[in-house]
Image (cartoon, rainbow, N blue to C red):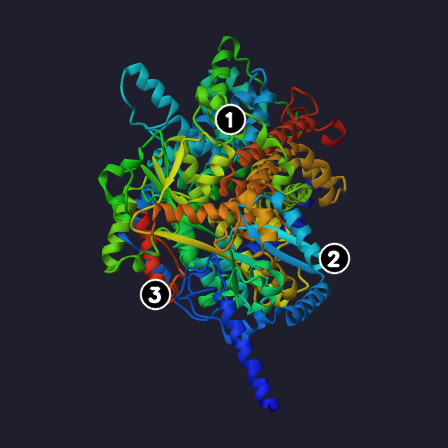
Amino acid sequence: MVPRAVSLIAKRRERTGGVDAIPLVCSWLILSVVVALLAFVLYMTFVPGLPTEPGFTLRHWSNVASSRLLTRVIPNTAIVGFGTIFIGAFFALPLAWLLNRTTLPFRTTFTTIIGIVPGIPGFILAMGWIMLLDERIGLINNMVASVLGLSSIALSVKDSPWGIAWVLGLILTAPIFFLVAGPLCRIDPSLEEAASVSGMRHLTILRRVTLPLVWPGILGGVIYTFMTAVSIFEIPALLGAASGRVPVLASEIFYSVRPGGPMTATFAYGAAGVYGTLLAVPSLLALYLYLRALQQAERYQVITGKGYRARETDLGPFAWVGMAFVVLYLSLAVGLPILVLVWASLMPVLQMPSREALAKLSFENYHGLLEGLGGAGVIWNTVLVVGCVSLLVIFFSFMISWVVVRTRAPSRKTIDMLAMLPHAIPSLAFAFALAMIAILASRWLPWLPLSGTLGIIMIAHLINRVPYGTRVMNSALGQVHRELEEIAQVCGTRTPTVMRRVILPLIKPSVVYLAVWTAMLSFQEVTMALFLSGPHNSVLSVSIWALWEAGTLGTAAAGAVAMVSIMGVLTFGVLKFAGGSATGFVGRGTALPPPSEAQ
Amino acid sequence: MRTAREVRASRSRRVRWQILVFLLLPAPFVTDFDAPQLLSGDLAAAAESPPKGKQALDELVAKAKQEGELVATIQSSWSKGLIQPLTDAFKKRFGLDIKVTIANVNSAQHFPLAIAETQARAPATYDAVQGDDAETMQIVGAGATQKVENWATLLAEINPLVRSGKVRPDAISRGPFQDHSFMFMANVKQLIYNTKSISEKDLPRTHRDLTDPKYKGKFAQPPWTSHWEIAPVAFDKFDKDEWLEVVRRAGKNTGAVIGESAAVQRTILGEFAFALAQDRYTRQIFAKDPKAPIAARFFEDYNELNQVYYSVRTRARHPAAGTLWVLWMTTPESQKIWQPSDLQAVPYGDSQLDREFKQNIEKSKARVIGFLDNEKTRELLKWYRTDEGRKYLDAVARAIRGE
């Protein structure tokens, strides 16, 4: 009976292409906005001035073609991109395994702390590393020099693409961790057990069974990290790009947008669009590889309805090695910047630690902090943006991934590629395109609430987060075998119900990860919000950035401490809530559906 | 017996004398004798301010009440704690019961959008905006600001310094900005150094000294061109290409190209020995930590005076409220609210900080040059609006990064 019904469903899928109207419409709704904005960015590369003015030119393309681009900018960008992947993967992969597939203690706490990393403003982390590793003021340099009896140690994170890659790698460890952790904790243990029974050792199982199974997650994480690393401006700028010593594509985009500072206060977005297109080339190449890996998605379907249960490895006497590794990473990526943050928030003016400086510590910067950040209005705006963006990203990512992974729609490859594209284009270019559209709308469609609203910030965030969201959802849906939904359909369940009652509970850990991650990224995002902010839609990250930019570093640091603390509490709360128990942090307990639903 | 015509002529002569006396009144901040004189109509309006001025102001206030709202910017560096006191004082001064929204805005970031709004003929996001000479020149030149009718009359009615004759209206609005933009504060670009890292005698004396290899990596400067752009009028003989080479060599010597506030912070940390920055940072740092190891010094060749202006935006949604705001922000009443926190000077002001600001410049005999000082500087400002001028500035901006 059941095989016949399944075959009927399969026949119906063949007829309809396996497409459901609702996910397809939702996918194209968001992707049409992406396409329109991309077209706008590309159009900007062919107009001489502002996009509202007529004219056609190839000047922007010819201007950027220089020997400097080939000999310095592209090599530096490549080092930063690949170096960041190397550092990120070096920490993230062992961390994901240790915190998801072993019995290491304090996993909930460690995961929560890793979740805080993206919320720490990048410029604070960069400043922290300058205070640690600098030829003149570096604490590590001074300590080593005094031990060796030298005047200084010529080691610095500044003015080197490797230094930039180190700092970016520490920050971007978290996305790889989160992308790999979801699939890793849902691997069918029977595969590993079979390998174990066959006589394979732990490391061999890890290398030959576990890693290949989470390969889409790793590849997605690596691509995402590469694209993010080459698009970030503020950290390379602090560490040498702004000085022209380590020019990277992101800094070239920024300076082509604002070539001369205030005096030449008009945009050169055509050039920014050209650089954005150049950045998109390696990203598209990586995307092609990723799509190829996903073509064999069924090889990675490790959740079935049959006795799914995650298996944990007991590290035994080596637990302390694992602990040391986790603590090392957390010290470098979280402990240090938070210490710097707290130190800066307690100082009237930031100075290096000394006896004299200790005497100046006070809580002055915390007095009237809420007012300094813009009051309750800013907090409310932030809550709205973070909450709505998380929900929208989950919804649209799920719909897109459903079409890509669960249907045979002829356009699914195009849809997946388009969903990934926003990450290949610098967020500044997207923000500009949105800002210009909002300006035009305020003239021609004054009833459309775009310019200066929270809505426009949400749209920008949504478009910017959809690539990550779809990677998480693709990876999660790719692991859920079709037989589960087919069984539900045999019982007469409609697709929306299948999504809600069968699929979503199974991929709940990934959904929770995505929600938390999106919320944190939206919480701390500055570039787009700065560009799109008006008198009525200011958010917390913009307030903190403004304080930093205005030179009130102490208050900015106090705000960042408050921000990181709030995020820590929220992340812990959400993960604990989703996990259902203190020990099952990523919803391990809920990954196995209740019997009534699984049957 | 005199005819009516003679009586009118006599009155007219008397009015002219009154105007002359008004012009010769001691003005503490009248340093620019090259500045263009006000139109006679404006001066007459200023002299006759009580009845005519009050009427103009009443009309403006009535319009502002009808508009019901004001959306204005303040400097991004200003404390958010200033917003409420400024709003309350503004509304009280004009008896307004309207919605006032004041936002911290970085003009360098907002003005390109403001220009885009103007070009797209879209309504302005903000009714009143502030920016420095160079920024304001951009929006005035792009037609993004609107003329304030009867500004001298209104200013005399609103600003007691102008009404009393202590300050000439053209000390507040003049040159290419006349009728459009109103100066309300200023700062001087100089050199801020860490006293523990470098001694005063070892500091560079001129901008050209920044090319000396002994300063390699020891200083920071901002990516914007304001420390270099006034140079064409600072030297008798100026060669653009030669100066670009100076900027480029200094750029290659620069330790970091970062915003001024961050540069000062990192100078205090000891990462850099000195930074090119505004004078106000020294005051702000000392206000927070009197023992901070920093000091400031002027360059001997030139130091740019950076003046900040308010303007009413073209197609502002609430132009009357915006006009009231930009004129009120020039008054001692508003200055008393923002100055203790921001610590920037008002060149025509009379507060202790303003006096110290002027005394400091006089005492050091520093050569401080502003864009509105004379015809030559104003021409330079206008030149920077041309394609040639912009290309030159772009080249300076690239040279700062050593390119």
Task: Work out which quarter of the rendered image holds the N terminus of chain B and state it.
Answer: bottom right
Look at label 1 and name its amino acid: Trp
Measuring from the top left, give residue B355's x and y in whole percent: 47, 48
The furthest residue to the top: A317
- The amino acid at mark 2 is Asp
- Judge whether A227 appears above or below B375 on screen: above
Residue B174 seen by the camera: yes
Residue at left 60%, top 59%? B160
Q: Secondary structure at mark 1?
A: helix
Which amino acid is tagged 3?
Lys
Whether discs 1 and 3 lie on one chain: the answer is no
Q: Position of residue A314 (x, y in %)?
A: 55, 13
Marks 3 and 2, how far apart in space?
45 Å
Circle 1 sits on which residue? A343
Along the polypeptide, which appears first: circle 3 or circle 2?
2
Q: Is residue B321 above or below residue A14?
A: below
Q: Nearer the viewer, residue B55 or B265?
A: B55
Quickly name the residue at label 2.
B97
| Occupied quadrant, residue A555 | top right
Q: Are marks 2 and 1 on the same chain?
A: no
Q: Please state which of the two labelled residues, at mark 3 or mark 2, is closer to the viewer.
A: 3
Depth check, front residue: A277 or A171: A171
Q: Which residue is mark 3?
A: B376
Classify mark 3: helix, strand or loop. helix
Marks 2 and 1 sit apart, C-alpha to C-alpha, by 44 Å
- The chain letter under disc 2 is B
Q: Secondary structure at mark 2?
A: loop
Spatial CA span between label 1 and label 3: 49 Å
Nearer to us in this view, A423 or B80: B80
On the image, the x and y values in percent for residue B340 come to 56, 43
Asked if the residue under mark 2 is in contact with the one under mark 3, i.e. CB atoms within 8 Å, the reply is: no
